[in-house]
Amino acid sequence: MGKLDKFIEVGRVAFIANGKDSGKVCAIAEIIDQNRVLIDGPCSGVRRQVCDMKRLHLTRFCIDLPHSARTAVVRRKWTAAKLDEKWKETSWAKKLEARRLRTNMSDFDRFKLARAKQIRNSIIALAAGKIRKEAKAKPNALRFRKPNKKRHIKKE
Amino acid sequence: LQQMAKSSAPHKPKNSAINASRLMKYSRARIFQRKAAYKVKKVKTPAKKSAEKAAAAAAFVVKKIGGDKNGGERKVYKKTPKSLPTQVASRKVQLRPKKTFKKHVRRIRSNLAPGAVLILLAGRHKGKRVVLLKQLESGLLLVTGPRKLNGCPLRRVSQRYVIGTKTRIDISKVALPERLNDAYFRRQRSAKKSAASAGGSADIFAKSDAAYAVSAERREDQAAVDKALMGAIKASGDGPMLRSYLRSLFSIKSGQRPHAMVF
């Protein structure tokens, strides 16, 4: 059970998780009954329609919408709130985008990625090797000491 | 009749089809009347039977025989066939007759265009990434490594054993030699072996063909195409990466699902 901080309410921006328009965000324009809401996403290509609450994953964004606001109003409020940008900046959206890029990689892209990883790993390995070498040069007593441990220094 | 033909205006057919159907306006009998065909005298053309035709039609063949005092020739009657058909063999109308291989429609997958990088899935060069040059008349694809990069020569390959990737190289400036066609790549059977098989007398276990040797024209064509292709690869955006890509081999790694992958 997560925090009960996001509510289904008029103006709540929700992410459609499955079915048609999956992957898009929309605003809740009206609550119909316990299970269904009226959603509308004019700026994200979601037609005004009835949607089951179970399909929606709520975001932390909420716009100031009067209930049953028509599409033009939703569009106005959405652009005023700059929701497109705000959504893109969330790590949720970024993760989705990264996943999308990964699945749409062509064979050549996969090769380039593998090659880039290899180069990065060789740089890391080189640097790690250097550190290991320097550590080996240190005397044993100093090598295995915890660097920030509080030591009792005898008063002499 | 000839005079009439000369003086008449452009020919207007006397009969016509009704409403674009197969039915004609006038029946055969009616047209006979309308054209006054009863006036036309039938001219019997003399039969132009050549001597050979006459001989073929005859029931016997005249053959010369040796020896004297025996007439010098004999009439050899043609043998009647052992069985004669009692009915006319009905010919099934071939609405869609069998097409010879040459006439088959050659299709090509939409994602395979000249310049596409392909992954070979079978054969000697399996796993290699090669460049598609064109589709030959037989439907097979003409590919090359380039040989400099991965050792795959100018070669024919079936579409079925190939994955077409999205990667494209612009080969519009690559001029392919004219002689690269199916006959060029056809497997050469040594003459001796074919003669032996026809005769049936030679030793069938004799290895008559020597090891395959690359012909001079193959080398020439390979060098020319490779040069042009390497130029095209260099000119394309990802030049160095593309080169090492074509050198590498394709394999499925753990966790990769080919049906879910985009190539």
Image: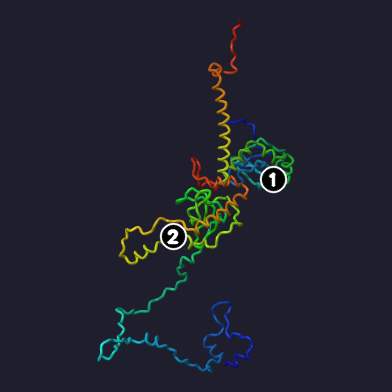
- Residues at marks 2 and 1, CA–CA distance in whole angstroms: 62 Å
SS category of the residue bearing label 2: loop
Q: Which residue is mark 2?
A: B187
Q: Which residue is mark 1?
A: A43
Q: Nearer the viewer, residue A114 or B41?
A: A114
Where is residue B131? Give x, y as percent. 54, 52
Q: Left of B71 or right of it: where is B105?
A: right
Q: Left of A75 or right of it: where is A98?
A: left
Residue B101's disc is: none
Does label 1 lie on the same chain as label 2?
A: no
Q: Give the quarter of the image for residue B191.
A: bottom left
Where is residue A56? Give x, y as percent. 61, 40
Indicate the chain on which mark 2 is placed. B
Using a 10 Å C-alpha cutoff, classify the residue at mark 1 as few (fewer than 14 neighbours), some (14 to 19) or many (20 or more).
Answer: some
Say which amino acid is labelled 2: Arg
Indicate the chain on which mark 1 is placed. A
SS category of the residue bearing label 1: loop
Q: Nearer the viewer, residue B113 or A27?
A: B113
